Image (cartoon, grey):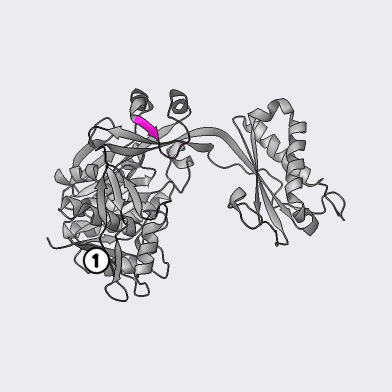
């Protein structure tokens, strides 16, 4: 084959739905593979920790139906990675059930489906602690950390997906996977250069977000050759420019020219971004560099339960109070401690998210002077004891009615507005990231880490 073309329609399958107009425009072309990443850690640790879906199931079914029906019409592979956001075993099984239902709904001819599981037991990790090192976590992985963790996944590379293709899989549903690997696996399986394929995977994994102007859930075609890859949007108003493709290649990393992958790195120092037309960009020169020591490492993601979370919302519209908000928060925290009892300080956490000041960037916010005429303070209390978390949140909310600050003109409560006087309880408990480490494997197909299941799905 001189080239391979993939239709990429979503950067997070089921997070909103694929736009059908550009999708069906794309399927008019010669498509060799349908690929979609369905996962992200951007959703936070709750969904992994609680092992629950992030998206409405009907949105996920909508996207899977488009990909399955069109891939089966053409008898080409369909690859989905990081099923249902987290890539846990239950998420893979949930997608598999959807595929089986859809096959019967559309009376599809039999096809081979591969399920790749990447959830790892804590007992297995405990046996391998000597093979695990921190990635971004500022601590070693220990038995104590594992005890605080509910669920852990390993992020597969291309090797596990390629194995499923070698076994003749038509539909591949993978657990947690590196975003670029989901797209890069098929061209690498077909013999195309690893560096070019991986860079294509990175550039194209968010579909139309690699193009300009920004649109979501619109389809693109990513084409891989021996010398370059190209990106072409299917929406007529979008363009893939050297600027847009380079920008998307460089985001989400501290080093814009290097992407770590299992077994090595994607090196983009010599990548060249060239306009083929005003809507299509080619990228040359990307390389895969194996690990100098020959090791193969995969990322581990784990999350654990912290406790219950309770919110209150307080609105402030007084320029004098706003000017003194930092001291007001200090005073409020002290008063909460005094009322709840200093001996209980270690039993809860209290956060103030000040929207209009630094709620987004916290201490990294460079804008020191507040120019807004109103602020929203989101009070967040976390504790393993839900009643205690509720008391802390209520106490903090109550104290804002009695805040004192220089130049104050009003009597009690005059500066505060409430959206509701009722505490707000999220549906799920609070979780935190506990595992962000690398696991060294002697074999990428280690069956204690990555497990395969193959079946023939019959729609008739």
Mark 1, residue position = 27
Can residue 211 be seen here? The reply is no
At mark 1, the secondary structure is loop
Q: Residue at x 64, y 58 (%)?
A: 367
Q: Is residue 189 left or right of residue 304?
A: left
Q: Is residue 237 above or below residue 111?
A: below
Q: Residue at x 34, y 68 (%)?
A: 242
- Residue 352 locus on image (x, y percent): 66, 45
Q: Quadrant of residue 28?
A: bottom left
Q: Is residue 77 left or right of residue 337?
A: left
User: How many other residues sit within 10 Å of disc 1, few (<14), some (14-19) or many (≥20)?
Assistant: some
- Residue 59 locus on image (x, y percent): 39, 54
The magenta-colored residue range is: 132-138
Q: Which residue is nearer to you in this view: 196 or 6?
A: 196
Can residue 349 be seen here? The reply is yes
Q: Residue at x 19, y 56 (%)?
A: 72
Q: Which residue is nearer to you in this view: 199 or 176?
A: 199
Q: Quadrant of residue 24?
A: bottom left
In the rendered image, the residue lying farthest to the left is 1
């Amino acid at each position: 084959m001189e080239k391979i073309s993939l239709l990429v329609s979503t950067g997070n399958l089921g997070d909103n739905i694929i736009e059908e107009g550009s999708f069906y425009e794309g399927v008019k072309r010669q498509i060799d593979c349908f690929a979609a990443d369905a996962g992200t850690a951007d959703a936070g640790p709750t969904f992994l920790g609680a092992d629950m879906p992030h998206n409405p199931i009907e949105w996920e079914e909508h996207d899977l139906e488009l990909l399955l029906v069109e891939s089966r019409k053409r008898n080409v592979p369909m690859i989905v990675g990081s099923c249902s956001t987290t890539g846990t075993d239950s998420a893979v099984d949930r997608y598999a059930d959807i595929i089986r239902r859809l096959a019967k709904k559309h009376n599809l001819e039999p096809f081979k489906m591969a399920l790749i599981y990447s959830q790892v037991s804590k007992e297995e990790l405990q046996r391998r602690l000597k093979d695990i090192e921190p990635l971004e976590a500022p601590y070693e992985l220990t038995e104590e950390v594992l005890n605080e963790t509910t669920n852990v996944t390993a992020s597969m590379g291309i090797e596990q997906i390629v194995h499923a293709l070698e076994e003749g899989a038509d539909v591949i549903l993978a657990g947690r996977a590196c975003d670029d690997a989901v797209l890069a696996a098929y061209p690498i399986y077909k013999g195309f250069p690893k560096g070019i394929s991986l860079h294509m995977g990175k550039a194209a994994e968010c579909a139309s977000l690699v193009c300009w102007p920004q649109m979501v859930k619109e389809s693109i075609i990513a084409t891989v050759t021996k010398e370059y890859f190209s990106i072409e949007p299917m929406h007529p108003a979008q363009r893939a420019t050297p600027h847009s493709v380079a920008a998307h290649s460089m985001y989400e990393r501290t080093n814009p020219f290097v992407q770590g992958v299992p077994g090595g790195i994607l090196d983009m120092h010599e990548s060249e971004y060239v306009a083929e037309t005003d809507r299509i960009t080619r990228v040359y020169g990307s390389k895969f560099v194996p690990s100098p020591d020959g090791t193969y490492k995969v990322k581990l993601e784990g999350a654990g339960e912290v406790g219950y979370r309770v919110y209150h919302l307080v609105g402030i519209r007084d320029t004098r109070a706003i000017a003194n908000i930092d001291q007001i928060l200090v005073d409020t925290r002290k008063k909460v401690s005094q009322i709840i009892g200093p001996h209980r300080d270690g039993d809860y956490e209290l956060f103030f998210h000040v929207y209009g000041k630094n709620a987004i960037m916290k201490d990294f916010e460079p804008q020191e002077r507040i120019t807004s005429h109103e602020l929203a303070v989101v009070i967040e209390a976390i504790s393993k004891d839900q009643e205690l978390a509720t008391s802390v949140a209520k106490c903090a909310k109550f104290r804002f009615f009695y805040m004192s600050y220089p130049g104050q003109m009003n009597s009690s409560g005059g500066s505060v507005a409430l959206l509701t006087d009722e505490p707000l309880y999220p549906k799920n408990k609070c979780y935190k990231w506990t595992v962000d480490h690398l696991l060294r494997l002697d074999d990428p197909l280690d069956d204690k880490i990555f497990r395969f299941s193959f079946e023939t799905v019959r729609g008739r």
